[in-house]
Image (cartoon, rainbow, N blue to C red):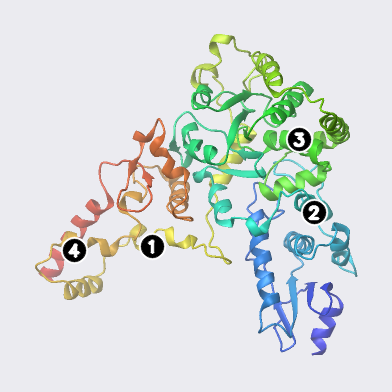
Amino acid sequence: MMADDNELMSASEIIQDRLYFATLRNKPRSTTNTHYFCIDDEFQYENFYADFGPLNLALLYRYCCKLNKKLKSTSLSRKKIVHYTSFDSKKRTNAACLIGCYAVIYLRRIPEEAYRPLVAGTNPPYLPFRDASFGACTYNLTLLDCLKGIDKAVTHGFLDFENFDVEEYEHYERVENGDFNWIVPNKYLAFSGPHPKSKIENGYPYHAPEAYFPYFRKHNITSIVRLNKKIYDARRFTDAGFDHYDLFFIDGSTPSDSILQKFLAISESSEGSLAVHCKAGLGRTGTLIGCYIMKHFRFTAAEVIAWMRICRPGSVIGPQQHYMEEKQAAMWVQGDIFRKKAREGQIANKNSVSRILCSAVDDISINDDRGISYGPGEQYKLRSTLSGSQAMTQGDKLRQLKVSRKARSATTGSLKLDEGKIHTRSTSSQPLSPQFLRTFLRNKASSKKISSATTSSTSPVKSSKVVSPTHTSTSTRRTTRHSAAATTGLKSGSSRINKEYSTGHNAGDYTTSTTSSSLKYTRSTPSSRRSRIAPAMCRCYELVQVW
């Protein structure tokens, strides 16, 4: 009892006599009066380089569900609830961010009020968050910035956990399922750049423009803005009825004033939502979307960076952070002028704005190579004919890091990510043991064909989904990771990008499995796993007969 009292004395009181946040060196044991819980190992950030947070929107949602469940539990109704964390500076900051955001969202506290108890007492300061770049950190994003970003998002209706679909968020954020996130609901969707052809190359899944059409149409996305060099033909979007704009600037750099103003004008004149992409959909994409949010919703630069990183981790990188700080005042002034003109009915007709933009965008250079421009006749050529440079850009590296992540099991909610994982037997290289064969022969009638029993030694996942042995050893791990995640059905009955390949130009590159309720796409291979296992089983059966 005394130990409990001593620990609570040094804890931050979030709800009086009910909810606390504490930093402890040792794992405590719950008592009759106090319930302790920790999420340090349950909710983890997937880093690119030295970045460590903040945790994404799905993990914030799951934390809030977990905490609400504890607060409403009848078995814990008479206990004090303590969310404790360790002295690991990164885990501690993420844990504090979660409970601070909970106070803003559910306890309706202003950011400073939610932040105050977290920094009270003698506990060490919180480590500031950093960007997803490889180099040294040049911009600190504080815990208070994140709380302010969440507060602004709630105020402007960006965040509504009552109508938040966590399964959809977790499905589409994965590279194999499209790699996109909504930053401003019904306005901006940030996504990784499409590829000319849907394929899997060295473990990385590429999606053709057609793969996105059903989702874009369903969610009223009418305009696509490309910020990187030309890799796919823009006419594949325009022929399908979408507006497409090219506003190129160098990967990892900041946009010119001309590009920024054109992007803002496109956004303000678009009838529907906009899908914006660069190479990875993080740096350049987040920078321009962030400027729009600063202009129209008066977020500070730090607040909008925090919000975008919670929505789409890794957004805004390196010098782009300082660029947004420099543009904050100008965006606020432009926003005030825009709203004043809107009230006075002085906003120009959107069609006239579109005509000006279309004529202005025609002569923009679209390539990561400096000094190269393209004439009117070359504007629809693909990367293979326009660019000879194959150097890895920042966007390429970030995309590769993102695709290497494993799908983790959900601890809160209805998700069951483990169901799609390949059974250990299907990847085992160990020979069948005599004991296994004796059991096998005893349980199976001798009249049955041995090949019909091979399904007992393979994964519940279809054999066509097992990675082909023709892959080299350097890419086997990455391909396996992709396969485990890609075969997981997170939301049956809804449209998925894997399913949508069937309507694309490159559907022939994949084979479909018609025995399941949803289409799954895999590479066609000359032989299946079953045909490899059956001869081995027969040989082992002959050995047992001789033995």
**Percent from the top left, x then y, of residue 120?**
90, 67
Please name whichever residue, 534 or 69, is drawn nearer the observer in this view of the structure. Answer: 69
500 relative to 61, above or below: above
Please name whichever residue, 490 or 440, is drawn nearer the observer in this view of the structure. Answer: 490
Ranked by sequence position, the earlier of labels 4 and 1 is 1
Name the residue located 87 percent from the left edge and 64 percent from the top edge: 119
Please name whichever residue, 478 or 507, is drawn nearer the observer in this view of the structure. Answer: 507
- Estimate the spatial distance between the alpha carbons at disc 1 and disc 2, rounded to whole Å: 45 Å
Quarter of the figure with the C terminus: bottom left
Ranked by sequence position, the earlier of labels 3 and 2 is 2
* Disc 2 packing (10 Å; few <14; some 14–19; many ≥20): many
Horizontal arrangement in the rendering, residue 252 relative to residue 236 (left or right): right
- Estimate the spatial distance between the alpha carbons at disc 3 and disc 2, rounded to whole Å: 18 Å
Residue 540: assigned label: 4
**Percent from the top left, x then y, of residue 456?**
27, 65
513 relative to 354, above or below: below
Residue that carries the numbered disc 2 in the rendered image: 151
Residue that carries the numbered disc 1 in the rendered image: 424
Please name whichever residue, 38 or 243, is drawn nearer the observer in this view of the structure. Answer: 243
Ranked by sequence position, the earlier of labels 2 and 4 is 2
Name the residue located 36 percent from the left edge and 53 percent from the top edge: 517
As shown in the figure, which amino acid type bears the numbered disc 2?
Asp
Quadrant in the picture for residue 294? top right
Ranked by sequence position, the earlier of labels 1 and 3 is 3
As shown in the figure, which amino acid type bears the numbered disc 1?
Thr
Ranked by sequence position, the earlier of labels 1 and 2 is 2
Residue that carries the numbered disc 3 in the rendered image: 292
Ranked by sequence position, the earlier of labels 4 and 3 is 3
**Percent from the top left, x then y, of residue 159?**
70, 52
172 relative to 332, above or below: below
